[in-house]
Image (cartoon, rainbow, N blue to C red):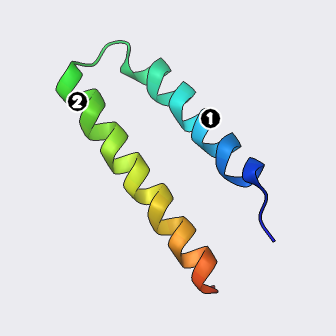
């Protein structure tokens, strides 16, 4: 069974990493990186909730 921390902690770590890397990036590149990251997180969550490998 997952807890809210299973979602919150990786999301916060991802946000911190994007902030650190994104300091030298333009706005459009940051938005693209954020979109890709959130898509990957959503995909992983769907696979885990579906009972995949």
| Residue at 76% from the left image edge and 48% from the top image edge | 5
- Residue 52 visible: no
Give the CA distance from mark 2 to mark 1.
Answer: 19 Å
Please tell me how crowded label 1 is: few (under 14), some (14-19), or many (20+) other residues with Cα within 10 Å: few
Pointer 2 or 1: first along the chain: 1
**What residue did someone put label 2 on?**
29
Where 29 sits versus 8, above or below?
above
Q: Which residue is mark 1?
A: 13
Which residue is rendered at x = 58% and y = 41% of the image? 11
Q: Is residue 7 left or right of residue 40?
A: right
Q: Residue furthest top?
A: 23
Pick the quarter of the image with the N terminus: bottom right
Q: Is residue 8 left or right of residue 41?
A: right
**Residue 24, position in %: x, y?**
32, 13
Q: Nearer the viewer, residue 22 or 6?
A: 6
Q: Is residue 22 visible?
A: yes
Q: Secondary structure at mark 2?
A: helix
Q: Is residue 19 above or below residue 48?
A: above
Residue at screen point 42% across, 49% down: 38
Left or right of 16: which side holds 39? left
């Amino acid at each position: 069974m997952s807890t809210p921390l299973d979602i919150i902690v990786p999301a916060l770590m991802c946000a911190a990493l994007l902030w650190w890397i994104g300091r030298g990036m333009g706005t459009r590149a940051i938005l693209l990186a954020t979109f890709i990251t959130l898509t990957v997180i959503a995909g992983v969550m769907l696979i885990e909730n579906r009972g995949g490998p």
